[in-house]
Amino acid sequence: MKRKVGLFLLTVLVAVSLGATIVASLAMYRLVSGLQNEDLRRIETSLSERFDVFETMLRAENKRNTAVMAKVLPQIEADATRGGRLPSELTVDELNALAAKYGVEHIYFINRDHKVFQTNLATDMGLVFPKGSFTEFLDSVFDKGRAMSDGVDLSSVTGTLRTYTYYGPPGRDYIIEASTDVRETLKQSDFGWMSRYFFEDYFSDAVQSNPYVADVDIYLINASGTWSLIRVGEKLDPVLAAQVLQIGRHEVPDANGHLVTIYSRYNRADAAKNETPMMIVRKVTYDLQLAREAVRHVFLSSMAVLAVMLPLVYWLTSRLLQRGILDPLLNLRGEAGAIAGGNLDHPIANTDRRDEIGHLARSFASMRDSVRSRINDLHETNLAIERFVPKAFLAKIGKPNIVSVALGDNKHEHMTIMFSDIRNFTALSETMTPDENFTFINAYLEYVGPVIRDHGGFIDKYIGDAIMALFEKADDAVRAGVAMMEALDRFNATRTAQGLTPVKIGIGLNTGSLMMGTIGELHRMDGTVISDAVNLASRVESLTKVYRVGMLLSQYTYDHLADPGAHAIRPIDVVVVRGKTRPVVLFEMFDRDPPDERAAKLRTREPLLHGIEALLQNDTVTARRHFEESLTLAPGDPAALNLLKSCASAS
């Protein structure tokens, strides 16, 4: 225990020290991170201002290019249709020649179904534009006779900035579309120097001017994806782009946690109403190493102080703790061990102390006295409960004790059921007072009850003067029945000595499947056995009165005997028991018969068994022959006579 308490104390000291160190480190981290976040906001503002300039440049270039295309596109249409030719008759070489002549990159011809039916870009040949705002724009171009632009866009193939201009020749069912590369046209415009500066240096100086900025990029969102304006052809993950558009800002740390990439949404607030807004995603990769370095320095410094001071603090604290608390607790643990070992009279020390230790010692002494009393009461209660609920019953339904039994607990078993009953008990009980009735039954059960337990069975319930018992093995049940007859002889000898009339009992055995469990309601439960096999065992016992024998076995019990020949058993009849439809073979146990009767019945056993076998196979001729043979061996034998009647009814 001393070691555990010492470890606990050390753990607490280390935890408190580490906690203080972590709090200080986090405070430093928040301070440095706050400064870095301010830098990041300034960079984002700077990028927004720079892009405002770039957007102005793009829109100016788009207007300039549209004005140029207003002159070029009618000339392209005139050259393409010269001599009455149709656009669909043009070859790719001819279209390339037109594009080179008029300074455009690609030429498209689009019909009223919004389908590209001629172009010098093979990948777009046959392209059909889906219905939407763009097809509505195309419908507005047809037959207008003037060049119209839908703004600056990105190529879905290369991701490069392009302008697309559309011209609807009067009286024609098609539109001419021409595309130009913005970078190339900017080089030829008044903004040539600015475009080159923007694409090459405008954003890179943001990285160079701030040591904590590792990378900067800007992406333009269009129908084909989110493309970089700095690195041609680079595309932003569509899932990431959707997140940025939805929440406005998204941070992605790298695997090592040194860099964090921040994506933020931007669109120009002062854009003209008639201008299509450009949706932009800004990307800034920020180095967090400065904040981490500050935290590391604070943490290492604190750990150095902790390593020096902790041993001294630990030694002083542990000495005080041991004298005031540990030693008394160790004494109390020794006393608890003695009580746990069964010494419920062991004295408890420190009960005179006025602090918490003394209160604990006094409580422990009271607990010792209470446990001693409860154990005695519980022992007596368990002994009493076992008289009402057999341990074997609890074991069968899988319960360790009576406390764990719940209403509805049940289990399927295959067992041998015994019913025994005192003959003419009703008439006998009428000659006795209630007290004498109980005295008689208890005296009888005192003889036969232990016999059942001694032979591997247990009594499920008493039903007045009757007993219902259960056995796992049929042989145990048969031996128990014979032993009960012997115990009855001893009981009758006592009654005869007292001048009382001897009693007789009947025993019936049957084997089969049954359900063992609890029935009743919440405040009153009882253990019971339910099955058709139980009912049949009760019927078999009642037939002992009819055949005037002491013990009867059903065919099912006979079939489960390990060696039927080891017992004095023979068939006595084939009957259909009341409430049943199938015939059942009944066997008589005559082990306790007088020697001459027992010998006579043994002589008839084999022919009777052969006759029963033939009868069950509906061979009444052979069965009758065996039963008549049995009558020859024992004239007037009731078993043979009963079975001959069964042959007659079967035929």
Image (cartoon, grey):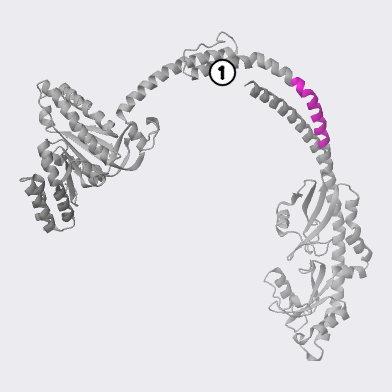
| Quarter of image, res 244 | bottom right
Left/right placement of residue 565 relative to residue 2 reads left
Visible residue check, residue 277:
no
Visible residue check, residue 343:
yes
Looking at the image, which residue is at 81% across and 26% down?
305
Point out residue 454 in the picture as x, y percentages from the top left corner: 28, 31
| Quarter of image, res 80 | bottom right
Looking at the image, which residue is at 73% across and 57% down?
241
Looking at the image, which residue is at 80% across and 46% down?
258
Left/right placement of residue 334 relative to residue 505 reads right
Magenta region includes residue 306: yes
**Camera-nearest residue between 160 and 313:** 313
Q: Please name the residue that numbered disc 1 is placed on.
A: 333
The secondary structure that dominates the magenta segment is helix
* Residue at the extreme bottom of the image, as rendered: 83
Range of residues picked out in magenta: 296-313
Residue 57 vs 92, above or below: the answer is above
Point out residue 177 in the picture as x, y percentages from the top left corner: 78, 76
Left/right placement of residue 488 relative to residue 357 reads left
Quarter of the picture containing the N terminus is top right
Quarter of the picture containing the C terminus is bottom left
Q: Amino acid at mark 1?
A: Arg
**Camera-nearest residue between 650 and 625:** 625
| Quarter of image, res 83 | bottom right
Left/right placement of residue 386 relative to residue 161 reads left
Magenta region includes residue 302: yes
**Camera-nearest residue between 571 and 380:** 571
Point out residue 597 in the picture as x, y percentages from the top left corner: 10, 39
Packing grade of label 1 (10 A; few <14, some 14-19, many >=20) is: few
Residue 236 vs 384, above or below: the answer is below
